[in-house]
Amino acid sequence: MQQDAYDVVVIGGGAAGLSGAMVLARSRRSVLVVDSGEPRNAPAAHMHNVLGFDGKAPAEFLAAGRAEISGYGAEFVTATVISALRGENGFTVTLDDGRQVTGRRLLVTTGLVDELPDIPGLADRWGRDVAHCPYCHGYELRDQRIGVIVSGPLAFHAAQMWRQLSPHVLLLLNGGAAPASEQAEEFAARGMPVVAETIAAVQVTGDRLTGVRLASGAVIALDAIAVGPRFVARSAVLESLGLKAAEFEMNGAVLGSHIPADPNGATAVPGVWVAGNVTNLGATVAVAAAAAQTTGAMINLDLIAEETREAVGAYRHRIATMFEEDAWEERYRGKDAVWSGRPNPQLVAEATELSAGRALDVGSGEGADAVWLAQRGWQVTATDISTVALSRAAGHAESAGVADRITFTHADLRQDAPAAAAYDLVSAQFMHLPPQARQELYAHLAGAVAPGGTLLIVGHHPSDLATTVGRMHFPDMLFTGEEIAATLDPSLWEIVAAEARPRPHTDPEGREITIHDAVLVARRRN
């Protein structure tokens, strides 16, 4: 194993386990399949009704499945699971070699155990010439002399199914109750003898079943035996999680025990899912695989829902904290330089031709815009929420020889509105806030523009989110120039520009792309 924590731990590597693992691994989930190497159908030389694998050995099917799933990144370990414990972040699974692995979800596909009638020699022939499912093995026993042992209430129904495959079918009551008169008539009509006596043993000659010996010593010659075992779910690991096995009924008859689940495989314990014979005792290989495919998809959806909830919580927390002073201080402390040190291009484009006067640089950061304006003769008030940024900006201003033309102010203009009508230029470059806070801030900034002055607001355009630029994904915080223009009173403002301006950019993977700045340029009327 390359790791000890997985999205999903699959317990049981039969048809159901591999099918569920396939869906999950192809969904790019980290998957570990823990398998004891004891498949239920191991005694059978062949399996049937599996498209593309009909007549193939079960081991061949499992090996092919493992190879395919490994190609999608799933991991496998041969071990027996001793127990599973539910914790805050998933499940801790303990293996018989003492190792522990964790999974956010569990898919349990441990299958079942076939409990056969206690008849000497019967179990030794299981999976060869002793069979239970006419659909799984019946065709291979066609036209042979088949004895159907009546081991449960569904045996009489099964006998009719075996009769479909061979004209030589006998009912072996093994000392049990005789069929009702209506059923007896049906068996007689189809030429099916009924043997009432108790079976003493299965007769074998060489490596071939030849019949059954009755308690009286009489021998009934047979080529094969059909028997319905009691099906018992391998439920120990599930019971360690508090899931108890329940009786499994079919047509009113109890066939054995299983772990109840909803149609998609979800159990009563959140995060624990089941598929295959551990929950559906009658599932064949194909049915178990199909059910687990659905269950695997449901597990993936369950994980997606959890991840989405977590993402929304983190998203909301980030929105609530990322614009506060502590977050900005931490961001600036984390790097020697956060920004390029060059003035923003839209400020250069708009302010180059303006007559120098009083400027308010909002969110001045490390001071590149303020220094550029001061070098062009502006008297600048540079505000920022971060003292670290302001200290760096002051150093840059000193180095550039313009410290006397810039006043650095530690302020949060969301609460502390700037002086009204005090500035010939108010510049806010890439000030992205939640809509309500943005609206309040920009109203303060508009109020700070003197008559005849210019309001310049620049931001990342919403269309950038569809590019590979790698923007933080906060759609509500992006805006267009037109949206900001719409908030200004046209009797007080002349809109000079409200548009998306393209500019070249290199994305994180080195590709040359085009991005857009949302630009508002507005002049306050005299």
Image (tube, rainbow, N blue to C red):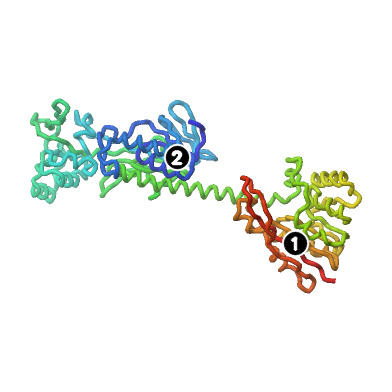
Q: Look at the picture and state if 490 lies above or below 500.
A: below
- Is 362 on the left-hand or right-hand side of 463? right
Sequence order check: which comes first, mark 1 or mark 2? 2
- Is 512 on the left-hand or right-hand side of 416? left
Q: Secondary structure at mark 2?
A: loop
* Residue at numbered disc 1: 440
Task: Measure the C-alpha gap from mark 1 to mark 2.
Answer: 51 Å
Residue 81 picture quarter: top left
Badge 1 crowding class, 10 Å Cα cut-off, few under 14, some 14 to 19, many 20 or more, is some
- Front one among 276 and 121: 276
* Residue at numbered disc 2: 72
The spot of residue 161 in percent (x, y) is: 18, 46
Could you tell me which residue is drawn at 31 percent across and 34 percent down? Answer: 59
Residue 395 picture quarter: top right
The spot of residue 67 in percent (x, y) is: 39, 36
**Is residue 118 among the parts visible in the rendering?**
no
The spot of residue 156 in percent (x, y) is: 17, 45
- Front one among 280 and 153: 280
Quadrant of the drawing holding the C terminus: bottom right
**Is residue 342 among the parts visible in the rendering?**
yes
- Front one among 77 and 512: 512
- Front one among 179 and 121: 121
Are dots 1 and 2 in contact, CB under 8 Å? no
> Three-letter amino acid code at disc 2?
Tyr
Could you tell me which residue is drawn at 26 percent across and 44 percent down? Answer: 49
Could you tell me which residue is drawn at 75 percent across and 46 percent down? Answer: 340
Q: Secondary structure at mark 1?
A: helix
